[in-house]
Amino acid sequence: MLYPILNSARTLIDLSGIWKFKLDDGTGFENKWYEKKLENSLTMAVPASYNDQKESMDIRDHYGYVFYQRELSIPKILQGQRIILRFGAVTHYAKVYLNGELICEHKGGFLPFEVEIQDKVRFDTNLLTVAVDNKVDQSTLPVGSEKDGSMMGGGMPSIPGVTPKKQNNPNFDFFNYSGITRPVKVYSTPMSYIKDATIVPSVDGNDAIVSYTIDTVGEGKVDIEIYSEDGEVVAKAEGKSGTFIIKDVNLWQPLNAYLYTAKVTFCEDSYDQTFGVRTIEVKGIEFLINGKPFYFKGFGKHEDSEFRGRGLDEVLNVKDLSLMKWMGANSFRTSHYPYSEEMMNLCDREGIVVIDETPAVGLHFNIGGAKGPTPVDTFEVIRTHEHHKEVVEDMIARDKNHPCVVMWCIANESDTATNPDSAYNYFKPLYDLAHKCDPQNRPVTIVGIMGASRGDKTLPAMDVICLNRYYGWYVFGGDLEAAKQALNIELSFWQKFGKPLMFTEYGADTVAGIHAATSTMFTEEYQVDYLTANHEVFDRHDFFIGEQVWNFADFQAAQGIVRVDGNKKGIFTRERRPKYAAHYLRSRWTKIPNFGYKTEIKK
């Protein structure tokens, strides 16, 4: 799916701003609120999560549908054009109505969807209504528990005469921010148009050989011109598929990005697709970018900020990447869902390496609020199979041309060890699907949960082994010598598989401003000691290819007795103020090269 742009062939209308908003009281669909203007509505900014925009517990903790509404005017000059209504993301289920007519539905809260409206729209004033459902359960991604209690909430006792309010019970440790969280846009194309573009670069000596496919609707000729960053034409091609050569190519490198632009022309339509030339390969125990062994330095993070929740904030995106570069970081994982297209475009430009992850978090019914009295086979109970396939396909279709994306992650912390055969049978087809869908055939991984190792058949089947481990926090908390011993034993176990391994999470909750001369848990000093202990072990192993700390910044979580105003594992506060550990990591990471870090160990 192409990102909407404005050019001489295409118009673009941004629907960001203040919309009308109303919580569904259970009668919204029965009384057909979508057919007329909402009564007694509130104001709500779009794009943004709705939860924190108003001082209301009913809004913050709402369970079920809400209604958004605004008037939509389409210029008459667009008559005869193809007109598309596009949503960057609506969390988690959307029903879209135009002038009272249901025109599309979409499941999944972190990927775009669109619908043609030229045959449905009036060329004056239209009523646009979006009904948004935030419920999570065992059929959604991310997953919610269908039992009482949440992962962090401690459960709800059943007491005769007490009726708890209906609420989501997320089987994941971040707040279930909801609403129209990414931009809503209307764009137009000619009726004969460019539908998609796929660009696959390879390197031959000093040159690039780039294959391409242009999907079009209608009859006509395709022409392509390739521009350098200086605006010079460096290659040309004709036809809907083929190859072109870029002489003396400038490679896209981590923290040193170079982007080319393919200007595609078809009939009256045109589209500019940026791309970078770089190679990705897993070879033995190394992860190679442009043929050199790359070392991941960075974070897991969240789309999370005050007031906006998970809503798009381009200022914050720029600031976050600036702070990463200040620290010497070169990468992050889109934990635990695909991030906005705007962030992916920014990472392309800034040279930040990205592990792109689906929203498949919480597929583990033997922990937290989903846990029952006896272990269950998660993959016999879960109802996400088909939706998970759709998400993998849609994520790769959206992000396939981004040079920043070097690996696909199909799930986070799933139950891969309790019933290893059923887990393997669930995930192996998704692994194969990801490889099949990706024209660049990037590596595919899954992130393993703490405690899952022996007996696990899924993680060893991946191209890279990614682990979330908390020795020194959840296990041997406060005893870092024991933590180092346990960590070394575990890494020795994984070494036998002969694959590269990295940590996609390791961290310690740290409350900014709490200090101690003798470090103890939750102090800023302990966070540094914890990280130092982990790094001592990481640096001993030649197959260990990267460290991504959990988390970049403090983030909001569901209410519960384990989290005090959110998860505090951030290296930065939620307001992006550095904790003591930020300066420690800066000192470490600015000394570690992006390439060849473990060369001496391998010798």
Image: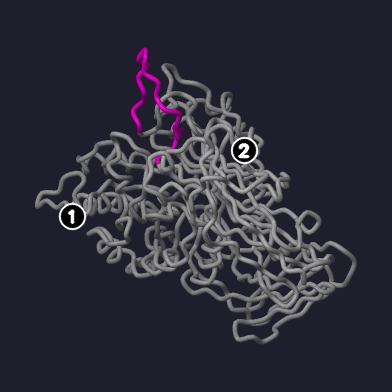
Does residue 481 belong to the magenta stretch? no
Task: Tell me which amino acid carries mark 2.
Answer: Lys
Residue farthest toward the front in the current orientation of the protein: 39
The circle on residue 428 is 2
Q: Earlier in the sequence, mark 2 or mark 1?
A: 2
Q: State the residue in front, 418 or 26.
A: 26
Magenta region: which residues? 153-173
- Characterize the magenta stretch by its predominant secondary structure: loop
Say which element carries label 1: loop
Q: State the residue in front, 534 or 9.
A: 9
Residue farthest toward the top in the current orientation of the protein: 160
Residue depicted at 56% across the width and 76% down the height? 258
Quadrant of residue 478 within the rendered picture: top left
Percent across and percent down for residue 551 are 36, 52
Residue depicted at 48% across the width and 49% down the height? 42
- Taking the image as drawn, is residue 283 in sight? no
Task: Tell me which amino acid carries mark 1.
Answer: Gly
Residue farthest toward the left in the current orientation of the protein: 517
Q: State the residue in front, 42 or 542.
A: 42
Question: Which quadrant of the figure contains the N terminus?
Answer: bottom right
Q: Residues within 10 Å of mark 2 (few under 14, many from 20)?
A: some
Q: Residues within 10 Å of mark 1 (few under 14, many from 20)?
A: few
Which residue was labeled with disc 1? Answer: 513
Q: Taking 368 as reference, is 601 above or below it?
A: below
